Amino acid sequence: MEVLQLVQNVDMVVSAWHAEAEFFSILLRKRREGAMSRDTANAVVDQLDHDIRGGGVVFLPCSHEVSQRTRDTLRHAAENVFIRAADALHLACASVNGFQDIYSHDKHLLLASPLFGLRGGDVIS
């Protein structure tokens, strides 16, 4: 419910290009686990497509600059930093595109956000 309230108060939701693949992976997992029917998943996809067409959801493209920012940041990170590749790509994409804040409920992504000069905000707490 907290996420729904958050997105209802913004003009658009912006994410890195690979978030779309992550989203579809989640839908497949929900169907596999029996937590979502194919019809419900299709309705969710239809809503996403509607929101993309209307400009309410935007996926930022990959660029050489995003790739370079990811490489440089991970190369110089301290040895005790825990960050997954997909999270690093999200953070680099946000940073390169001029965002100062990133929102998630993923504790690892939020803890790594300062590496990319971003403030992390938890969408649930």
Image (cartoon, grey):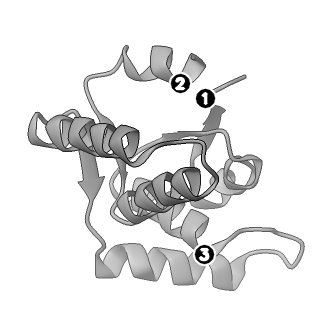
Q: CA distance from mark 3 to mark 2?
A: 24 Å
Callout 3, which amino acid? Ala
> Based on the displayed image, in which of its 4 quarters is residue 125 positioned?
top right
Residue at mark 2: 3
Residue 100 place in picture, x, y as percent:
47, 41
Query: Upstream in the sequence, badge 1 or badge 3?
Result: 3
Callout 2, which amino acid? Val
Marks 2 and 1: CB-CB under 8 Å?
yes
Per the image, label 3 sits on a secondary structure element best described as helix
Per the image, label 2 sits on a secondary structure element best described as helix
Query: Upstream in the sequence, badge 2 or badge 1?
Result: 2
Q: Residue at x 27, y 31 (%)?
A: 12
Q: Residue at x 60, y 42 (%)?
A: 35
Question: Viewed as shown, does residue 13 lie left or right of 123?
Answer: left
Residue at mark 1: 123
> Based on the displayed image, in which of its 4 quarters is residue 71 positioned?
bottom right
Per the image, label 1 sits on a secondary structure element best described as loop
Residue 74 place in picture, x, y as percent:
65, 79
Q: CA distance from mark 2 to mark 1?
A: 6 Å
Residue at mark 3: 85
